[in-house]
């Protein structure tokens, strides 16, 4: 009976969304941004343009009026300003903090529904983090959980009207400036944890394994070359974290805008469900990678444990051994 009621409620919800889309189309017809209302709108170009935004966020307050306001499809901005994504991010922060305070303010021995839901959510994230990183991940569970909750809230708020429909509000994670900021914060966290856990010498020894020269000049050169590659890859991590999140969230907004402009009602409802799940997955990917990067940064390469160059030389020897053992007489 409860399953039937749930399905019936879901069906009513879908029908209500479709009816709302049709009503919005009739009452407020699509129009291109910057064009006066009532101007004829050509299908489908005008319909699509009215639902799309450039990657650059809308500037609400320019804190440096002497700086010329950029125009065009700018992605990363370097001027002090308050943008639509920044305002929406502040709203997300207030909502997440407010819900956290309301759900955990009493902390009864026998929890109520809100406290039970908060504990269930945190314990689920904790168990997931520990299943990935073991006991070494336990100190970083709060960081992992907080990062996931903030990002998933920032993703989902873009699916709620009027966010994305008016200039003053837009999903924070659809702006590369926000995702790059999150990635740089994560980058700072796992670098600081690496130095704190391993010390300056131990952490830098992962990238400059000079101890491998004890095994020979060739082994030392190979180890140093591999360490420099790992050092370069460290600076790629914030780029991959930020661009993956930004690309998927902004791409989802573009897909929703195009489908909504072309079909008005029915297909966008199904796409909203897909975007809901994809946004959840993207938040999980970002937080999981951040956790894994912290664990990698805090794992040392000790001379008696690593022997990186020796492993590389052994692997090369195994590959070359069949060729070296083959002689013309045996051919």
Image: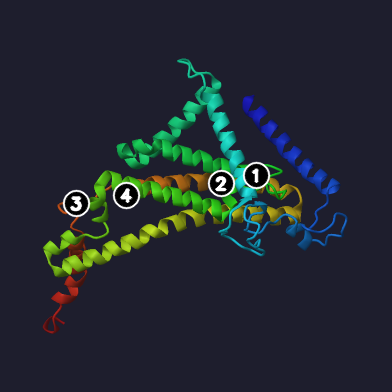
Along the horizontal axis of the image, is 131 left or right of 63?
A: left
Res 144 → quadrant? top left
The nearer-to-camera label among 2 and 4 is 4
- The image's colouring method is rainbow
Secondary structure state at the residue bearing disc 1 = helix
> Could you give the CA–CA distance between mark 3 and mark 4, rounded to whole angstroms?
13 Å
Location of mark 2 (residue): 279
> Which comes before the other along the chain, label 2 or label 4?
2
> Which comes before the other along the chain, label 3 or label 4?
4
Label tally: 4
Residue under the image location 47 percent in, 41 percent down: 147
Location of mark 4 (residue): 297
Mark 4 and mark 2 in contact (Cβ < 8 Å)?
Answer: no
Q: Is residue 118 visible?
A: yes
Location of mark 1 (residue): 159
Q: Is residue 204 above or below residue 105?
A: below
Secondary structure state at the residue bearing disc 2 = helix
Secondary structure state at the residue bearing disc 3 = loop
């Amino acid at each position: 009976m409860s399953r039937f009621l749930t399905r019936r409620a879901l069906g009513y919800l879908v029908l209500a969304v479709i009816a709302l889309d049709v009503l919005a189309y009739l009452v407020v017809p699509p129009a291109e941004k910057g064009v006066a209302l009532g101007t004829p709108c050509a299908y489908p170009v005008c319909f699509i343009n009215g639902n799309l935004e450039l990657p650059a966020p809308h500037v609400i307050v320019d804190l440096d009026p002497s700086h010329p306001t950029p125009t065009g499809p700018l992605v990363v901005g370097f001027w002090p300003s308050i943008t639509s994504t920044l305002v929406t991010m502040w709203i997300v922060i207030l909502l997440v903090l407010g819900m956290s305070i309301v759900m955990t303010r009493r902390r009864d021995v026998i929890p109520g529904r809100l406290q039970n839901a908060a504990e269930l959510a945190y314990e689920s994230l904790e168990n997931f983090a520990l299943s990935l990183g073991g006991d070494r991940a336990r100190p970083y569970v709060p960081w992992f959980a907080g990062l996931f909750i903030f990002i998933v809230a920032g993703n989902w708020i873009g699916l709620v009207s009027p966010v994305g429909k008016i200039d003053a509000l837009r999903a924070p994670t659809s702006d590369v400036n926000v995702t790059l900021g999150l990635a740089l914060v994560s980058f700072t966290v796992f670098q600081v944890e690496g130095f704190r856990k391993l010390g300056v010498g131990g952490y830098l020894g992962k990238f400059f394994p000079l101890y491998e020269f004890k095994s020979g000049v060739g082994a030392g050169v190979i180890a140093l070359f591999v360490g420099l590659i790992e050092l370069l890859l460290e600076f790629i991590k914030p780029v991959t974290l930020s661009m993956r999140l930004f690309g998927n969230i902004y791409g989802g907004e573009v897909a929703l805008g195009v489908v909504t402009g072309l079909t008005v009602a029915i297909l966008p409802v199904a796409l909203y469900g897909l975007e809901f799940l994809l946004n959840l997955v993207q938040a999980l990917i970002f937080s999981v990678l951040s956790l894994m990067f912290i664990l990698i940064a805090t794992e040392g390469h000790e001379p008696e444990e690593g022997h990186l160059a020796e492993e590389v030389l052994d692997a090369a020897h195994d590959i070359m051994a069949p060729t070296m053992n083959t002689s013309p007489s045996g051919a």
